[in-house]
Amino acid sequence: MKILILGDVMGSSGRKAVKNNLSKLIKDETIDFTVINGENAADDGKGITKSISDEFFQLGVDVITSGNHIYDKKETNDYIDQENRLLRPANFVETSPGKGFGIYPTKDNRFKVGVINLMGNVFMKKTDDVFVTAKKIKNKIRLKDNADFIVIDFHGEITSEKMAIGHFFDGLSTGVVGTHTHVPTADTRILEKGTAYQTDIGMCGDYNSVIGMNKENSIKKFFKDKSATNHFPAVGEASLSGIIIEADHKTGLANKVTRVIEGGTLRK
């Protein structure tokens, strides 16, 4: 079983990279299941729309995860209730539109994959305690019980929260990846009980930027230059960034994890 997980798709350049490369990547790497974080996929880098989601699904994405920008486009509030393949963080308050986890079939219906979307509490918008939520979900989606494989997207600002969640789910999930900070970390590994892990898998966007935003404007904002405008995405050639997990169908745990970095200024 091979699972592809790609980091935050950033604006139009990120979408273009996904459109131009994803189908080939899935074919060349014989990917069985694909998860992508789409919360920055809109043109302004904030939110996602139905049309963007539909395009991702048509390109081979099985589940779209998200984070703090999930509701930035008004139409998403209604759409996310109708499309169970688009997730919002599970530790949003219960009355929030959509859901934070689910179990999905692979395209050939051989396996069931649990996908859990969580968001950190530190330096993020106010949500329920992510560790309390994680403990509850652990009892709802169980590896080799009601799901053959389980992957977790932890959308957070600080490394310690992500690492703690990784160790909490070690041996209980196929993989735990961090998203949100848009810069891939160099700690890709399999934890001691068999769960693939990376603190942040980066973004699918233009790395000739400041975390995906236009670099000149971002520098102006840091210098409090009055000519700076609201942040807007860089539009150069994007890099695809994420991981591929090869997992044992008998245990649901990882045998191998490989970083994916293709195209743009971050290419290998």
Image: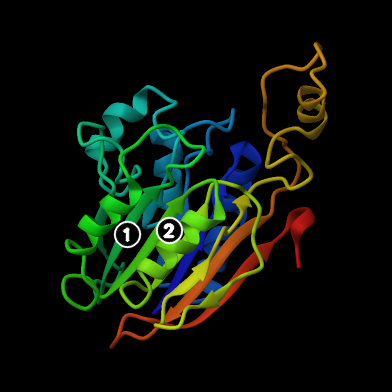
Give the quarter of the image for residue 102.
bottom left
Residue receiving disc 2? 35
Q: How many marks?
A: 2
Q: Up-down: is 137 above or below 143?
A: above
SS assignment at label 1: strand
Three-letter code, disc 1: Val
Residue at (78, 27) in percent of width and height: 222
Please report contact status of discs 2 and 1: CB closer than 8 Å, yes or no: yes
Going by the image, does 138 lie left or right of 23?
Answer: left
| Structure colour scheme | rainbow
User: Whole-percent x and y of residue 168?
Assistant: 36, 67
- Is 111 rendered above or below residue 128? below
Q: Is residue 257 left or right of residue 230?
A: left
Is residue 10 left or right of 108 when viewed as pictured? Answer: right
> In what element is the residue under mark 2?
strand
Q: Badge 2: how crowded within 10 Å, few (<14), some, or many (20+)? A: many
In percent of width and height, residue 135 lies at: 25, 59
- Please state if 82 lies on the left or on the right of 6 as rendered: left
Give the spatial CA distance, label 2 vs label 1.
8 Å
**Where does the C terminus fall, quadrant-wise?**
bottom right
Q: Which of marks 2 and 1 is nearer the N terminus?
A: 2
Pick whichever, 234 or 177, lies toward us: 177
| 210, 236: nearer the viewer | 210
Q: Is residue 59 visible?
A: no
Which quadrant: the N terminus?
Answer: bottom left
Residue 77, picture quadrant: top left
Check disc 1 and report the residue beneath it: 115
| 124 shown above or below 130 | above
Report x, y in % for residue 65: 40, 49
Q: Which amino acid does label 2 sit on?
A: Val
Whether residue 167 is visible, yes or no, is yes
